[in-house]
Amino acid sequence: MPALLPSAYVVPVLLLLASNVFMTFAWYGHLKYKSAPLAMAILVSWGIAFFEYTLMVPANRMGSGVYSVVQLKTIQEILTLVVFAGFSAWYLGQPLKWNHYAAFALIVGAAFLMFYDGSGTAS
């Protein structure tokens, strides 16, 4: 059986990253346009979310070949926080504070534990 290529590990993560960019805009992008009608915000968000799904579903399909479902979800959540942190500061003009960074550091620690297999190495 051939060894798994590094791309088998990397491509799902890149797809998850891209899908999170779309989903962050779908969920929060309308906050910059609060005067737009709610129905329009919902329809535009649905349209953006369609592209998120076209990336998320293949990412999870491909990623499940090399990661456990729990690991995939952990990767997705970490990427969500990273993308949201940048989006919040750059697009919405709401920079992060020290306590946000501290909370993210704790979540990264939790992610490490998710990948730790107990043998002294990360799986």
Image (tube, grey):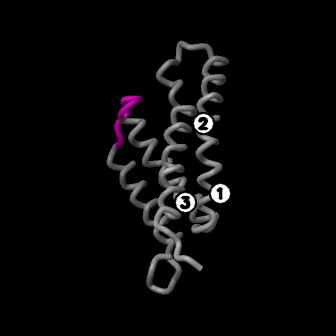
**Above/below status of 46 relative to 71:** above
Residue at the image point whose x is 44% and y is 85% from the top = 120
Choose top left, top right, bottom left or bottom right for residue 37.
Answer: top right
User: Which callout, 1 or 3, points at the residue further toward the start of the chain?
Assistant: 1
| Residue 94: x %, y % from top left | 38, 33
**Residue placed most toward the observer, 24 or 51:** 51
**Above/below status of 33 relative to 54:** above
Question: Residue extending furthest left?
Answer: 98
Query: Label 2: which residue?
Result: 51
- Mark 3: secondary structure: helix
Of the numbered discs in the image, which one, if any, rests on residue 61?
1
**How far is the residue under mark 1 from the one under mark 3?**
15 Å
Magenta stretch in the rendered image: 90-96
Residue at the image point whose x is 40% and y is 30% from the top = 91
Residue at the image point whose x is 50% and y is 56% from the top = 11
The answer to whether marks 3 and 2 mark residues whose Cβ atoms lie closer than 8 Å is no
Query: Label 3: which residue?
Result: 74
**Residue placed most toward the observer, 51 or 122:** 51
Task: Using residue 2 as the reference point, say whether residue 88 is left or right of it.
Answer: left
**Above/below status of 104 relative to 42:** below
| Residue 115: x %, y % from top left | 51, 71
Q: Label 2 amino acid?
A: Phe
Q: Label 3 amino acid?
A: Thr
**Type of secondary structure dominating the magenta stretch:** loop
